[in-house]
Image (cartoon, rainbow, N blue to C red):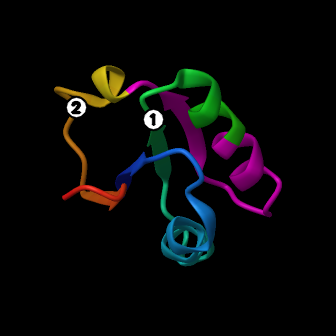
């Protein structure tokens, strides 16, 4: 499936605990969105360090807009 993680600065264990099981289950693609592209890319490198076959990509929240995802994980403090 195709998954989007909408993250906030300092995603911490909460977001990681939500994403790692998806990677371990074999999610095909993961897009990490953050207001700051550099922070999204840092998260991408964090998850890339795990043994995963998922196609990982990162960008801004605007980059994520308009795409169709099977799952969206909101790891922000706002709902």
Residue 12, percent from left and from top: 62, 64
Quadrant of the rendered image containing residue 41: top right
Left/right of residue 23 with respect to residue 4 in the rendered view = right
Quarter containing the C terminus = bottom left
* Residue at left offset 37%, top offset 53%: 3
Residue 2, percent from left and from top: 36, 51
* Residue at left offset 59%, top offset 68%: 16
Marks 2 and 1, how far apart in space?
15 Å
Secondary structure state at the residue bearing disc 1:
loop
Quarter containing the N terminus = bottom left
> Which badge, 2 or 1, comes first in the chain's sequence?
1
Residue that mark 2 sits on: 67
> Magenta segment, which residues?
43-60
Residue 47, magenta (yes or no): yes
Along the line of sight, the residue nearer the viewer: 78 or 4:
78
Quadrant of the rendered image containing residue 60: top left
Circle 1: is it few (<14), some (14-19), or many (20+) Cα within 10 Å? many
* Residue at left offset 71%, top offset 60%: 52
Residue that mark 1 sits on: 34
């Amino acid at each position: 499936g195709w998954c989007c993680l909408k993250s906030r600065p300092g995603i911490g264990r909460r977001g990681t605990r939500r994403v790692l099981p998806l990677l371990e289950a074999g999610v095909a693609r993961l897009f990490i969105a953050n207001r700051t592209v550099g922070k999204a890319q840092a998260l991408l490198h964090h998850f890339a360090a795990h043994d995963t076959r998922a196609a990982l990509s990162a960008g801004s929240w605007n980059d994520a807009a308009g795409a169709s995802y099977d799952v969206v994980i909101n790891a922000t403090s706002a709902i």
